Image: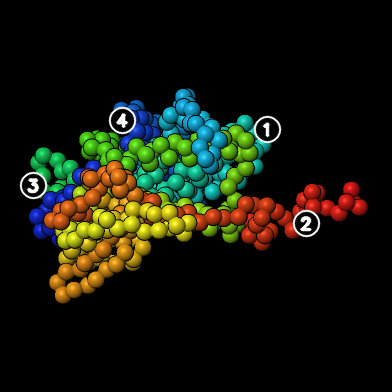
């Protein structure tokens, strides 16, 4: 937690009112997201108890699994709803022209977005996906194929939550926490009821803190899932489960109906809070970089649909060494890019980064715009420099590529850092966006006395190159040890 975040949390605790940490919304918000609440049974981590889901606030669908017996009918109904929603995102495509690295292709104009209450629900869906995608498809059981497909999509969506800036599967508590900070602990912020009470207290509450205390009332508080409250389990669920186990087949249907009514009443407050939070987030202006990230989300979704149609094999339980390294590199790239784009879009984010040394602001004290260097081929290149004086901490190394929100196309390479008693002098070289000597882009060339805030550039992190699968040893996920390319065989054996 940064100094600014700590200060805002202490201020929220002192005043009893939530504090804003972001001026803009940095994640895409669909016009028709799929809200999904899940409850699991005590015991196996992936066994569902109930799911409430839908795309309209007043028409949720409730699916309830019987206390004992097969959960296949409920999973089949869940698969039907989720895959139908995903398929509706695939109705229209757009053409993407060929680039230097990729051929021409088509991309869907939309992608699915599923909103869940908290990170614990994401983990539950991940566990459920791990269980379902490896299930055997039985032609005698028609529901087995859509259930396996549901496992594929749940795994894909859960994996996307590891990518910062992804909006495919989003925990609502994390989404709200990107824009508001409360006076309670981060662990308490994982409870949707108290977090939302801080952010949007009812009219009768004197402050967000008082509203949160009321929301914690054990007589009215309901867990957002996937685990249920212990008192609810002991006092209400356990008697129904016991009655279901003792009842004859004719009475089990009546008890199951009572269970559905009980779980619907249990989930309804969280369902209403999810749509309340959706309205709050929808009212926030969208950051500039959000559209680009959603375009990438649509590209990844289109590629996943192509993989499912072409191959369809489930992702392995454990990645091979190269596959794990690729996923790690992609995640690190997404972390760096998302942080840089947020800083370029949002002054609140830039202010926080200045307290951590990941950005700095200062006054231009000297310029050298006549500087010309010669590259390896002897060609002259214009590389103007300037010096900036700052009192902010600068925790960066020379060579770091920087950007300025006022001049988005420009890039600045950090050349030298000189620490003095009260200030730090930073010498920077302009490497992109400044035009040419004969036709300079004057907006990029700062004048002495200008105040600039520089953050890490979105493109400062480059993905490493990984070998193709056929060039990877079998120990790291390449072809099997007994694999032989016929083109390399001995001519005498042909």
Residue mark closest to the camera, 2 vs 4: 2
Q: Are marks 1 and 4 in contact (CB under 8 Å)?
A: no
Determine if residue 298 is in view: yes
Instruction: Kindly report the distance in space between the C-alpha atoms of the residues bearing marks 3 and 2.
Output: 73 Å
Pointers 4 and 3 in contact (C-beta within 8 Å): no
Q: Is residue 453 left or right of residue 239?
A: left
Marked residue nearer the N-terminal end (1 or 4) = 4
Binning the other alpha carbons within 10 Å of mark 3 as few (below 14), some (14 to 19) or many (20 upward) gives: few
Q: Residue at x 55, y 47 (%)?
A: 131
Residue under circle 4? Answer: 57
Task: For marks 1 and 4, give the CA distance.
Answer: 37 Å
Hey, which residue is sitting farthest top in the picture? 91
Foreground pick, 419 / 198: 419
Q: Earlier in the sequence, mark 3 or mark 2?
A: 3
Q: Position of residue 27 (x, y in %)?
A: 32, 42
Marks 1, 4: nearer the viewer = 4
Residue 206 disc label: 3
> Which comes before the other along the chain, label 4 or label 3?
4
Q: Position of residue 120 (x, y in %)?
A: 39, 51
- Mark 2 → mark 4, Cα distance in angstroms: 57 Å
> Residue sitting at 59 percent across and 44 percent down?
314
Q: Position of residue 52 (x, y in %)?
A: 39, 36
Q: Is residue 330 left or right of residue 384?
A: right
Residue in the picture at 79% in, 49% down: 487
Image quadrant assignment for residue 351: bottom left
Residue drawn 54% across and 48% down? Answer: 130
Q: Secondary structure at mark 1?
A: loop
Coordinates of residue 364 in the picture (x, y in percent): 17, 58
- Mark 2, residue position: 482
- The image's mark for residue 140 is 1
């Amino acid at each position: 937690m940064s100094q600014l975040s700590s200060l805002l949390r202490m201020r929220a605790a002192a005043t009893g009112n939530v504090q804003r940490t972001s001026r803009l919304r940095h994640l895409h918000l669909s016009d028709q997201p799929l809200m999904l609440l899940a409850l699991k049974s005590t015991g196996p981590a992936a066994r569902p108890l109930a799911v409430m889901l839908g795309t309209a606030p007043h028409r949720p669908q409730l699916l309830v699994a019987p206390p004992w017996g097969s959960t296949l009918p409920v999973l089949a109904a869940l698969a039907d709803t989720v895959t139908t929603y995903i398929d509706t995102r695939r109705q229209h495509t757009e053409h993407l022209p060929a680039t230097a690295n990729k051929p021409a292709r088509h991309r869907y104009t939309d992608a699915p977005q599923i909103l869940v209450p908290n990170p614990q629900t994401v983990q539950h869906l991940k566990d459920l996906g791990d269980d379902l995608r490896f299930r055997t498809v039985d032609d005698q059981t028609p529901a087995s194929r859509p259930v396996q497909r549901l496992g594929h999509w749940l795994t894909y969506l859960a994996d996307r939550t590891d990518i910062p800036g992804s909006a495919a599967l989003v925990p609502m508590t994390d989404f709200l926490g990107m824009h508001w900070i409360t006076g309670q602990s981060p662990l308490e912020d994982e409870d949707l009821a108290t977090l939302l009470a801080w952010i949007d207290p009812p009219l009768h509450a004197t402050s967000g803190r008082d509203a949160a205390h009321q929301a914690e009332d054990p007589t009215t508080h309901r867990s957002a899932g996937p685990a249920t409250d212990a008192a609810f389990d002991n006092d209400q669920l356990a008697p129904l489960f016991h009655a279901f186990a003792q009842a004859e087949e004719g009475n089990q249907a009546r008890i199951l109906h009572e269970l559905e009514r009980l779980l619907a009443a249990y989930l309804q407050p969280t369902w209403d809070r999810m749509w309340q939070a959706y309205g709050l987030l929808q009212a926030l202006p969208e950051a500039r970089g959000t559209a680009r990230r959603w375009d990438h989300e649509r590209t990844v979704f289109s590629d996943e649909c192509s993989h499912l149609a072409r191959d369809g094999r489930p992702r392995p339980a454990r990645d091979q060494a190269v596959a794990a390294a690729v996923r790690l590199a992609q995640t690190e790239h997404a972390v760096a890019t998302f942080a840089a784009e947020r800083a370029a879009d949002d002054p609140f984010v830039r202010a926080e980064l200045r307290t951590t040394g990941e950005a700095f602001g200062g006054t231009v004290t000297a310029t050298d715009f006549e500087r010309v260097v010669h590259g390896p081929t002897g060609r002259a290149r214009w590389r103007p420099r300037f010096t900036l004086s700052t009192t902010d901490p600068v925790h960066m190394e020379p060579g770091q590529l920087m950007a300025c929100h006022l001049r988005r196309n420009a890039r600045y390479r950090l050349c030298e850092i000189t620490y003095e008693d009260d200030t730090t002098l930073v010498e920077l070289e302009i490497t992109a966006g400044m035009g040419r000597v004969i036709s300079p882009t004057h907006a990029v060339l700062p004048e002495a006395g200008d105040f600039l805030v520089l953050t890490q550039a979105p493109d400062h992190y480059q993905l490493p190159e990984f070998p193709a699968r056929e060039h990877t040893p079998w120990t790291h996920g390449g072809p099997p040890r007994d694999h032989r390319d016929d083109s390399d065989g001995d001519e005498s054996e042909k």
